[in-house]
Image: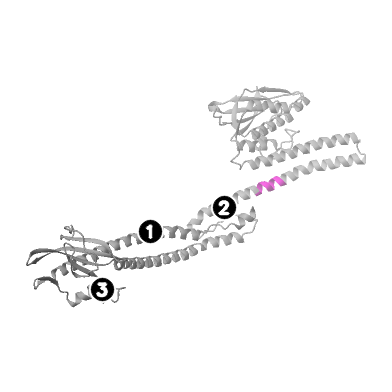
Amino acid sequence: MAEELASRTPPSLRRRLMLWLAVPFVLFLALDAYTSYRATLRISQIAFDRLLVTSAHALADLIRLERGELQITLPHAALEIYDSSASGDSGTRSRMVYRVSYLDGRYLAGDEALPPYQGRPAIHPLYRAMIDLYDTQQGSEAMRMAALLQPVETFEGMRLLIVQVGEPSAYRDRLARDILLQTLLRQGALLATLLALVWVMATWAQQPLRAFARRLERRPADDLAPLEDPVALRELQPVVVAFNGLLARLHGAREQQRRFVADASHQLRTPLSVLQLQADAGLSGDIPPQEALASIATTSRRATRLAEQLLSLARAQQTESLAAAQNEAFDLGELVSEIAIELSPLIARKHLDFQLDARPFVMESQRWMVREILANLLRNAMEFTPDQGRLGVRIEAREQGGVRLVVWDTGPGMSPGMQAVAFTPFAREPSARPNSGAGLGLAICADLARTIGAGLRLNNRVEDGRLLGLDVELVWRPVAPDN
């Protein structure tokens, strides 16, 4: 999996920027080129059509009645335009053709091979003359034609002639394509220049990022101090703030781990040393073997309990950062009964009177955390309650769906100074509580309670000036299930 992630090339900011600029720009250029091409075609069509209309009127004005016959005489300059054989440079000039015929189609003058106009032109709305503009074919060549209805006075009276003037459509199409090509070349050069500038600017703009990365690479692995000097770009400030936050969390986790390791090693050193001394005493015969085994068993139980509490504390501290833990619905009263049954052998060994005052109360929370809290509170209560004493659990519903769970005992209570540090790991008050353990139970409960959104309170139970015991209250407002 690591090799697959390493081989996967991350996206480049520079390439992404160029892509997001190039794609819409190319689309815009394509649309602009298409609209320009269509507009050029339309304008050239209008211009060349006007030229055809003008040429048709000019030809019509040259028709004369000579010696009783209709004749058309073209000047020398006009012959060069209309004569197809005189158009030597057909690539740069438009070769024009014409035909003059009677209304019935009979040929009079011009290019006899040109198809005669069929019908009678109507008045054109733009030119206000009886003229028609149309497309036709002359052989394999497309032609654009203008057909003008021209009346001519003869001896026989008024005669109607059709004057047709046309030119190949290829010339105007080629002209439009040339204009389109020149436009595309200019726009392509503009696009290439723009992308080159974007590439250079993006490369230059990434220099602060590369400098920032080099600074991070030069930092020692154990340097978790925040970055204090300013960065070159304002856009990097959120990155620096987030990075400093990460460093702070890593520093806190490392300090927590360091303290835990130091405290755990210190706390475990004593029972392990005692175990060694007890085993040596039994082996050397200083004490009877049975007494040595009993002492070893007692110390082993204390070491096991201490190790369990250390693991629970580590798990509780780690769980504080887990925001995605899944809640589940459960009955708090049933959970208390389950824990009480599980601890009943310990309760019976000290001949304790256990009381459970609980009603069914369905809540939503992280069940294993609530169970760990209750189990630790009950073990603490049993540890500091004298033989044949009393302890119990009371569940009270609060307003707006909250709940308060009280674990009470008839032990020696807790001094105000100890209450102030009771939730600190390894905090103990041997003078007031000589049988105290490692001082981890309440610290574990406090960490877990904070994770599930609850709070712990310690109160000495006093009546008529007499200390009756200690109440430990677990108070929170759980989210009730939907059903």
Q: Main secondary structure of the magenta part?
A: helix
Q: Which residues are magenta?
A: 254-261
Q: Give the CA distance from mark 3 to mark 2.
A: 85 Å
Towards the viewer: 246 or 19: 19
**Which comes sooner in the sequence, label 3 or label 2?**
3
Name the mark nearer the viewer: 3 or 1.
Answer: 3
Q: Amino acid at mark 2?
A: Asn
Left or right of 421 on screen, residue 303 = right
All told, the count of numbered labels is: 3
Which residue is identified by label 2? 244
Q: Quadrant of residue 224?
A: bottom right
Residue 28's label in the rendered image is 1
Question: Which label lies toward us, 3 or 2?
Answer: 3
Q: Earlier in the sequence, mark 3 or mark 1?
A: 1
Return the residue at label 3: 84
Q: Amino acid at mark 1?
A: Phe
Label 2 Cα crowd, 10 Å radius (few <14 / some 14-19 / many 20+): some
Identify which residue is drawn at 82% across, 43% down. Answer: 273
* Mark 1 surroundings: few (<14), some (14-19) or many (≥20) residues within 10 A: few
Q: Circles 3 and 2: CB distance less than 8 Å?
A: no
Q: Secondary structure at mark 1?
A: helix
Residue 475 is situated, as x and y percent measured from the top left of the image, at 60, 30
Front one among 19 and 394: 19
